[in-house]
Image (cartoon, helix red, strand yellow):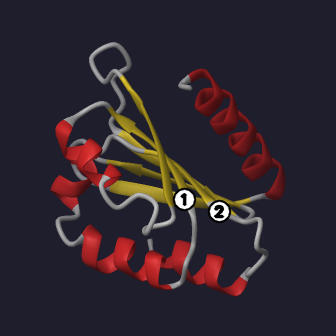
Amino acid sequence: FHDMLLTMKMDRDPGKEILSVTSGKDILDILPDHVETFIKKRVKERIPIRWIAPDSAVDKAFLEDAASSYREMRFFDLKKYPFHIELDVYANKVALLSSEGKPSGIIIENEVLAKSFAALFNLIWDCLK
C-alpha cells in the first residue's frame, strides 16, 4: 500500500482516484494496522477512493465517515460472489493481494492493463447501483 500512496501523491491529477475491490475483513485480518498505515495517510493526502466490498457489518462500518474520508462505497454479496483478494487500480498500476494462505501480491505497472481494469471496475460499480 506504500506504493499506492507514493504514486498517488506524486500524480496530483485532481481527477485521479483509487479504485478498489476488496474482500474486506480478510485484508483487515492479515493487515490489522491497515487503518493506521494506509487509510489515515490516504485521507491526510485527500486521495479519493471508490471501494467495492462485501455487504458485511465490518465493511459497512466504513460508511460512517465515508464523506470525510474521501470514500465512496458499493457492496456485493460475498456468499454469491466469493472474493478473497484485494484488487486496486491507481494511476497506471494494478495491484493484486491474496488474503488466503500465505499473503502475497504483485504490482503491475502498465497503462493498458490499468485502463482495462478501471473499465472493468466501472462496469461492476455501475451494476451495483
Q: Is residue 77 above or below residue 3?
A: above
Instruction: Give whichever of 80, 93 is nearer the camera.
Output: 80
Quarter in which the C terminus is drawn: top right
Instruction: Determine whether label 1 and label 2 are within 8 Å by CB.
Output: yes
Q: Which residue corresponds to the image point at 30% horizontal and 55% vertical from the top-left?
A: 64
Label 2 sits on residue = 17
Query: For the residue labelled by badge 1, is the local secondary structure a helix, a strand or a loop?
Result: strand
Q: Which residue corresponds to the image point at 41% horizontal and 52% vertical from the top-left?
A: 97
Q: Residues within 10 Å of mark 1 (few under 14, many from 20)?
A: many
Whole-percent x, y for residue 120 in the image: 68, 33
Whole-percent x, y for residue 46 in the image: 55, 78
1 or 2: tag closer to the N-terminus: 2
User: Position of 118 compared to 27: left or right?
Assistant: right
Whole-percent x, y for residue 7 in the image: 64, 78
User: Position of 100 compared to 44: left or right?
Assistant: left
Instruction: Give whichever of 96, 50 is nearer the camera.
Output: 50
Query: For the residue labelled by badge 2, is the local secondary structure a helix, a strand or a loop?
Result: loop
Which disc number belongs to residue 112? Answer: none
Q: Is residue 61 above or below residue 54?
A: below
Label 1 sits on residue = 49
Q: Which residue corresponds to the image point at 83% horizontal and 49% vertical from the top-left?
A: 112
Q: Residues within 10 Å of mark 2 (few under 14, many from 20)?
A: some
The amino acid sitting under disc 1 is Ile
Whole-percent x, y for residue 61 in the image: 23, 49
The amino acid sitting under disc 2 is Glu
Alpha carbons under labels 1 and 2: distance apart = 5 Å
Instruction: Give whichever of 128, 109 is nearer the camera.
Output: 128
Instruction: Give whichever of 67, 102 is nearer the camera.
Output: 67
Q: Which residue corresponds to the image point at 69% horizontal and 42% vertical from the top-left?
A: 117
